[in-house]
Amino acid sequence: MQKKKNVTGVVYSTNPDFDYTYNSDSEPETLPPQQQVLRIFLEKKHRGGKTASIIKGFVGKSEDMEELGKLLKTKCGTGGSVKDGEIIIQGDMREKILEMLISKGYKAKKSGG
């Protein structure tokens, strides 16, 4: 099966010189840690009664966010995931996460309740 190209707007053109415009799913460049402003939330809803620490505000490539999420999971010794632009760490690990992010050079603070 052949993959379709991401052509926007025009389906067909009789103009031989027509240049198609393609969707570019470009991710923003990863900002250095000093320019990142991360917020750490505690969430209990939609998780079956279990708490989760959520880090929001990361600007950059998904690979770099995955790497940061993996580092936080190993340092906290818990599970978690990275999806929808958020890093989710199981349990109330806000203090540990805050210390680790500040030691890595990120501007981080606890938010929410």
Image: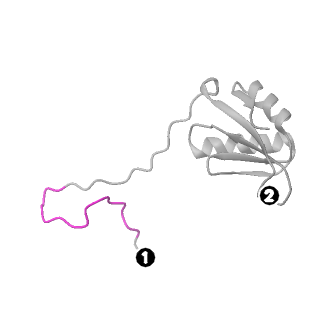
Compared with 56, 102 (above or below) is: above
Q: Do the residues under discs 1 and 2 have CB atoms within 8 angstroms?
A: no
Quarter of the figure with residue 61: top right
Q: Residue at x 64, y 27 (%)?
A: 33
Looking at the picture, how far across and down is residue 44, in whole percent?
Answer: 81, 51
Residue at disc 1, secondary structure:
loop
State the predominant SS element of the stretch in magenta: loop
Q: Residue at x 74, y 34 (%)?
A: 111
- Mark 1 burial class by Cα count in 10 Å: few <14, some 14-19, many 20+: few
**Magenta span:** 3-18
Looking at the picture, how far across and down is residue 107, in whole percent?
Answer: 69, 25
| Cα distance between the residues tagged 1 and 2 | 39 Å
Compared with 75, 19 (above or below) is: below
**Closer to the camera, 27 or 86?**
86
> Disc 1 or 2, which lies upstream in sequence?
1
Q: Quadrant of the C terminus?
A: top right
